Amino acid sequence: MPSIDQFRSEPIVETIGGDRTMVLNMGPQHPSTHGVLRLLLEIDGETIVRIKPDIGFLHTGIEKTCEAKFYQQVIPMTDRIDYLCPMTNNLAYVLAVEKLLGLEIPPRAMWVRLMLNELTRINSHLVWLGTHAMDIGAMTVFLYCFREREEILKMFEMVSGQRMMTSYFRVGGLSMDLPLGFLDYIKNFVSYFPDRIEQYSDLLTNNPIWLGRTKGVALITKEDALELMLSGPTARGSGVDWDLRRDMPYSGYDQLEFKVPVETAGDVYARYQVRMAELRESISMVKQAIANLPDGPVKAEAPKVVLPDREKMKTQMESLIHHFKIVTEGFTVPEGEVYQGVESPRGEMGYYVVSDGTAKPYRVHMRSPSFANLNAIGVMCEHNLLADVVAAIGSIDIVLGDVDR
Amino acid sequence: MSIQPAITDLELLKERPAVACLLSALPEAFLSAKFDRDELTVWIEPIHLINALNLLRTSTSTRFTVLADLTALDWFPSEPRYEVVYSLLSHERRERIRIKVKVNGADPYIESVTGVWAGASPFEREVFDLFGVRFQGHPDLRRILMPDDWEGYPLRKDYPVEGYR
């Protein structure tokens, strides 16, 4: 067995060739890196020769922490991975645990999950659009986007009491039913939001500066996208026709009608078009979910897993015992392992949960889309201009909490 | 929906495309298989890993062209201690498969799959960083999430959750 040193390649600073190139450090506090991403750029004049991301500044060991917590205590950890789409992460995790338990959830809970999941996608895409446009120099879009995002965060606060770290989904359903007046609020939102998408589009789609900064920039081919494990809108901008919501449906997506926007150009503009089209599709999915939303319970009939209603817990001895047991000892999950992938706004968010039959997960692994999509940065930027790095990072829509976990 | 018992009997699984493909073209690589909760897991002989993955990737009956995920498990204190887990995905057939290889605890190393999927590079670095499993032939095997001078491998089961004090 060769020693470990054989695997190490030389650090970038020592291998730069001759006196033509220089190494430029970008980040970790650079405003356009969307968090704490550090990039080492080897440049020859204005052209990038090599680019290496340096990550790990936000690593908090969430996967290790999960192993020391009960299954239900992991849910708040999943919010904190990707702070722009907390519901998507909650959903992927609870679906994985429900699959391990063999638990069926009531239809109302499923539709509410789906509806909020699509709102989360809109929320995340609005932050992406605003910050991406601001990075390239279009300041106005940011203010427009955050106006609507505020409405979505208000809705999250209505259902869960929290604007960002919602933790609203539970293993076996939801933490509580939707509040009174919520449906009216969301119906009002979906009625005016399509016009707002046109407002953003008017500011950018035919804007000559925007076109100049995005068309033909940071190209990536379909073959490279598959080879580099890209997913989500980043891959769909390069012609990879794959969306987990349509192709491997979960949580009721098979009962919806929607299109999966795909562009073949593979540049920043193509990824912009895909995400703008996804905004329109998402709003139509929210409408369908509202129309399909049935009445009924929001928690599964599984007293050993799902916390009882407050009323029952106060009046029935058996419910009190179950409540006490779940809170103090957690619930046990049969031995096994599952991988649950969901389509997050960034791509395939996968939870690989291994159970050894106790009340704590043996291993929780998060396959985060940003971590894989960061692979693209090399192909997108090398042999291109330094100024386009910012456009490239914006177009793959990374969240550094998601990369580092 | 209740849980069906896991199927490990090879007679019941040999019809599945991935198992059939491995058994016919590369029987020496195949160790065992399990079908549990609608997910197929196949254990592969470590020395044949690259050939098996290449076969599953190119064979017309399987077409697992996408590597969805790469991670590892630590089964401390049993031996072989580690399992490296590859989640493959077939876009054409809309199917997933989990490939596992067992790696011993004394000198954990396995062939790198960066030659098959270049995108596996950061995933292998992550496993090296957090489990200490080395990937032979990886172009740039350094720590990725932890600081470069960190001692120990945090996701190993004998590493305390609060870290060493």
Image (spheres, coloured by chain):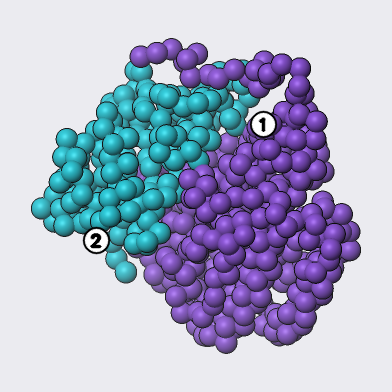
Of labels 1 and 2, the one closer to you: 1
Residue A54 percent location from the top left of the image: 66, 32
User: Which quarter of the image is occupied by the N terminus of chain B?
Assistant: bottom left
Residue under numbered circle 2: B4
Chain letter, colour purple:
A
| Chain to which the residue tagged by mark 1 belongs | A
Picture residue at 34% right of the left edge, 18% below the top? B106
Please determine whether, in this image, residue A245 is positioned above or below residue A26: below
Picture residue at 58% right of the left edge, 36% below the top? A61
The reply to whether the C-beta atoms of the residues labelled 1 and 2 are less than 8 Å apart is: no
Instruction: Tell which of A302 and A232 is nearer to you.
Output: A232
Inspect the image, locate mark 1, and give the three-letter code of the amino acid beneath it.
Arg
Secondary structure of residue under mark 1: strand
Image check: B99 left or right of A193?
A: left
Number of numbered discs overlaid on the protein picture: 2
Q: Is residue A336 visible?
A: no
User: What's the mark number on residue A50?
Assistant: 1
Inspect the image, locate mark 2, and give the three-letter code of the amino acid beneath it.
Gln
